[in-house]
Amino acid sequence: MYDQIKENCERIMDPSSAMMMQPDDEGLQRCLDTIMGDNPIGNFLRDLYHHPGKYCKCMASLDEATPECFVTLPNDVGRVPLSFVKKEICLLEIGCDAIDGFCEGEIQSLDECLPPLEDKSFSC
């Protein structure tokens, strides 16, 4: 999957690329399709969007509980700093806040355009 993301998103994500600021629509769509496709990242992001309560409520406590150390990968493939995991958790917290803000905006828009529940003259 990393190779697919690199191939389809590198020009969009690379700050040294002249295309970074003005990606073409097809390239941007290809990148989004790659990231949001049927893969672990896309599946997680869709699940987060549809079920934010499943993840968002525990992010703050998970961030606080994650120690500042390294985890050795199986078969001594390498070590992963948990500070990286803490940064990813922080990004998820930002995503949770964005989802909350989006939902609040949608509710406000619906409240402004729909009649009150007590209005019996409204019929679907």
Image: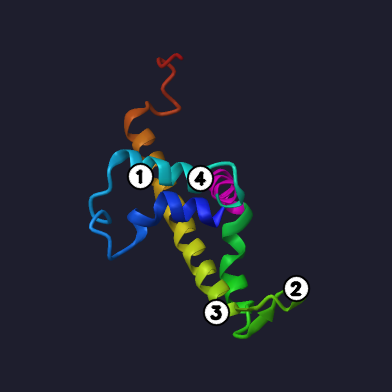
- Please identify the residue farthest to the bottom as the structure is shown: 69
From mark 3 to mark 2, how far is it between C-alphas? 19 Å
Nearer the viewer's eye, disc 2 or disc 4?
2
Three-letter residue code for mark 1:
Leu
The residue that appears at 27% across and 43% down in the rendered structure is 24
Residue bearing mark 4: 36
Give percent across and percent down for residue 5: 48, 53
Residue bearing mark 2: 74
First in residue order: circle 3 vs circle 2: 2
Residues drawn in magenta: 42-53
Nearer the viewer's eye, disc 4 or disc 1?
1
The residue closer to the viewer here, 89 or 28, is 28
| Circle 4 residues within 10 Å: few <14, some 14–19, many ≥20 | some
From mark 2 to mark 4, how far is it between C-alphas? 28 Å
The residue that appears at 62% across and 64% down in the rendered structure is 58
Callout 2 secondary element: helix
Give the left or right position of residue 50, taking residue 10 as reference: right
Asked if labels 1 and 4 touch by Cβ distance under 8 angstroms, the answer is: no
Is 16 within the magenta?
no
Up/down of 40 relative to 120, above or below: below
Callout 1 secondary element: helix
Give percent across and percent down for residue 42: 55, 47
| Circle 3 residues within 10 Å: few <14, some 14–19, many ≥20 | some
Instruction: Give the main secondary structure of the magenta stretch.
Output: helix
Nearer the viewer's eye, disc 3 or disc 2?
2
Three-letter residue code for mark 2:
Pro
Residue bearing mark 3: 83
